Amino acid sequence: MKRNSKVTSTVSSAIALVLATASTTVLAAGFQIGEHSATGLGRANAGEGAIADTALVLTKNPAAMTMFDKTTVSSQLAFIAPDVNTDYEYDDVNKCTGFGPGKTCEKISATESDYAPDQFVPSFAAIMPVNEKVAVGFAMFSNYGTGTEVSDEFAYGDLGGTTSIITIDSSFNIAYKVNDLFSVGVGYDLVIGQAKMKKSFNTGFDNSFDMSGNAIGHGWNIGTLFTINDNNRLALTYRSAVDMSFEGDFDAEGVFNPGVSLGDGSVTGTVDIILPAIAEISGYHKLTDIFAVHYSAMWTQWSSLTELTATSESCASGGNPLFDPFENGVCFQKDLHYSDSMRYAVGATAYVSESVTLRMGYAYDEQAGEAVVVMPDTIRHQISAGMSYAVSNTMSLDLGAAYIFGDEVSFTEYSELGGEQEFTSTGTAIIVSAQMNMVF
């Protein structure tokens, strides 16, 4: 029985990791990452699937590979500096009156400051035309990931701790140009994920939780490109959902496994999640020789996250049903409250000269899920600017920068240390990205 209870507690906390870690690193809906290119960052990713100015368009639309007549390679590195702060109150144990249920205490106001660490996000893409009709390409990037580090001073330690989840997408693609008007591309996505979570605090006895797990998932993507003429293009893309099964070691003590003496050792368990599907429509229109506008609308199927389930061979039925409620290896199941979200972006590009290109953009990102301390999800706004410089006919450099700010969000979350608690969070982020492109 010790073993079953242990799995229940630790896997349920592992679910808290996967569910409640969102991209505070980039302040995107859910735990989504959109920093794939410096050119895209400079225009807030507006029109990204239709512009095809660097090989990293492959992270958005495989059909756009037909726009390239030479082998092209692009690599970028984004630096993300978020600032997430949460205000809350906790009891002043030195100023309490009464006993038992009637006990009341004065409140102390506190702020958990800047608990989303800075992050580097790289990406790479290569496109090779086979002939005038066919092109192939490969890209490595991340669509989902996060990291938060709540300090030891945070009063509700069971809601904090250190969390990290990252996915790496290796995408293999092929595109076919049907005619001058229409191109189509498809791809296979191999997704590797790693999740870690650690909590530790003391309330007269040890309370700790340690989890790490890895997963491999498989997905696919499809894209279309409508080339109306040299100055007007439209794109429609879809990237499938990816089932990820994080398998790893779980261990817990104290409030993370209440009322159970665990002993030493760890238990292997599995946490299943779904990386949501994404669909996007993009447009690009060059109005004059030096000025173009572009736009995007992206839908993410967060509603597919209806529940999270943890399983282990240790969670088999048997024994006293009052103390051994497990069925068919299911250790824990939790209903989720996510809704599909939309992200809208508009931008403009100025072709100043043959060597210099300037761009800017704005994006509005809807809230996807209920806010929690390690994921204060909310509505976000992004303001971006960027530039490109063509060093030669075969090499160009890109820079992009963005400022993201979210609406203030208030929410409640249950803590084992203090019951239902109220929190108010705000968040901003500064993102800068550098990119190099080579044509062979």
Image (cartoon, rainbow, N blue to C red):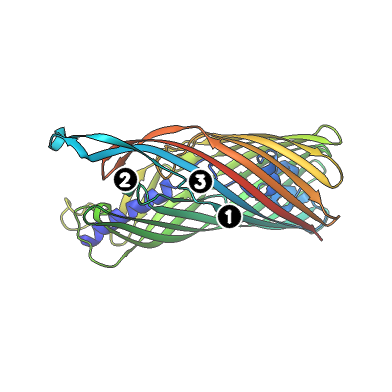
Could you tell me which residue is drawn at 86 percent across and 55 percent down?
393
Could you tell me which residue is drawn at 62 percent across and 48 percent down?
35
Could you tell me which residue is drawn at 26 percent across and 38 percent down?
91
Q: Which amino acid does label 2 sit on?
A: Tyr
Q: Which of 35 and 132 is in front in this view?
A: 35
Q: Would you place residue 21 above or below residue 405 in this image?
A: below
Q: Left or right? Give the position of 359 relative to 100.
A: right
Q: What residue type is labelled 3?
A: Ser
Q: Is mark 1 on a helix, strand or loop?
A: strand
Point out residue 148 in the picture as x, y percentages from the top left corner.
Answer: 45, 50
Asked if disc 3 and disc 1 are in contact, CB closer than 8 Å, the reply is no
Point out residue 43 in the picture as x, y percentages from the top left corner.
Answer: 69, 40
Point out residue 225 in the picture as x, y percentages from the top left corner.
Answer: 73, 42
The circle drawn on residue 120 is 1
Q: Callout 1: 10 Å neighbours few (<14), some, many (20+)?
A: some
Q: Callout 3: 10 Å neighbours few (<14), some, many (20+)?
A: many
Is residue 141 something that shows in the picture?
no
The circle drawn on residue 345 is none
Give the residue at mark 2.
156
Q: Would you place residue 197 above or below residue 295 in this image?
A: below
Q: Which of marks 3 and 1 is in front?
A: 1
Q: Which amino acid does label 1 sit on?
A: Phe
User: Distance from label 1 to label 2 (Cα)?
Assistant: 29 Å
Q: What element carries label 3?
A: loop
The N terminus, quarter of image: bottom left
User: Distance from label 3 to label 2 (Cα)?
Assistant: 21 Å
Q: Which of 111 and 77 is in front in this view?
A: 111
Q: Nearer the viewer, residue 80 or 280?
A: 80
Q: Which of marks 1 and 2 is nearer the N terminus?
A: 1
